[in-house]
Image: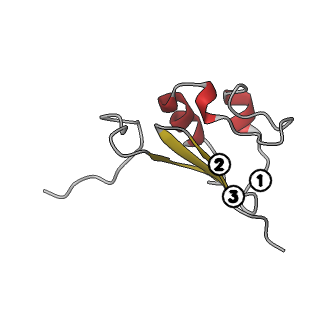
Amino acid sequence: MPKRLQTYETPEITVTFDPNVCIHSGVCVRGLRAVFDVRRRDWVHPDAAPAADVAAQIRRCPSGALQYAWAPGHEPPDDGATSPPSET
């Protein structure tokens, strides 16, 4: 039976975790211990660090189990995510 998608929200950012995709590399935990702590029942606390830091750490997730979305009006001008080159 698949595990349910977990969602964690702040006014700035929404973080989702798909336990069915996670490979347990520990990249998230080692990068932002205050946000990602597997000893807690609700192990993701995106409000424990600046949203830009949370987004940067999520982009390091090798499996893609962690994802994020900016709340409307809170997108930084450049959050460091890569985008395809534009065609000229």
The residue lying toward the viewer, choosing from 75 and 79, is 75
Q: Is residue 38 left or right of residue 60?
A: right
Please provide percent x and percent y for residue 14: 53, 46
Please determine whether, in this image, residue 73 is positioned above or below residue 63. Answer: above
Residue contact between numbered discs 1 and 3, judged by CB atoms under 8 Å: no
Residue that lies at the very extreme toward the left in this rendered image: 88
Q: How is the image coloured?
A: secondary structure
Residue contact between numbered discs 2 and 1, judged by CB atoms under 8 Å: yes
The residue lying toward the viewer, choosing from 21 and 73, is 73
Q: Mark 1 or mark 3: which comes first in sequence?
A: 3
**Structural distance between the alpha carbons of marks 2 and 3:** 13 Å
Please determine whether, in this image, residue 77 is positioned above or below residue 72. Answer: above
Look at 84% across and 74% down and name the residue there. Answer: 1
Which residue has dot 3 on it? 18
| Quadrant of res 37 | top right
- Which amino acid type corresponds to the residue marked 3 in the rendered image? Asp
Q: Mark 2 or mark 1: which comes first in sequence?
A: 1
Look at 61% across and 52% down and name the residue there. Answer: 16
- Which amino acid type corresponds to the residue marked 1 in the rendered image? Ile
Which residue has dot 1 on it? 23
Look at 65% across and 48% down and name the residue there. Answer: 62
Q: Is residue 41 left or right of residue 63?
A: right
Res. 57 mark: none
| Quadrant of res 41 | top right
Q: State the SS at label 1.
A: loop
- Which amino acid type corresponds to the residue marked 2 in the rendered image? Pro
Which residue has dot 2 on it? 62
Q: State the SS at label 2.
A: loop
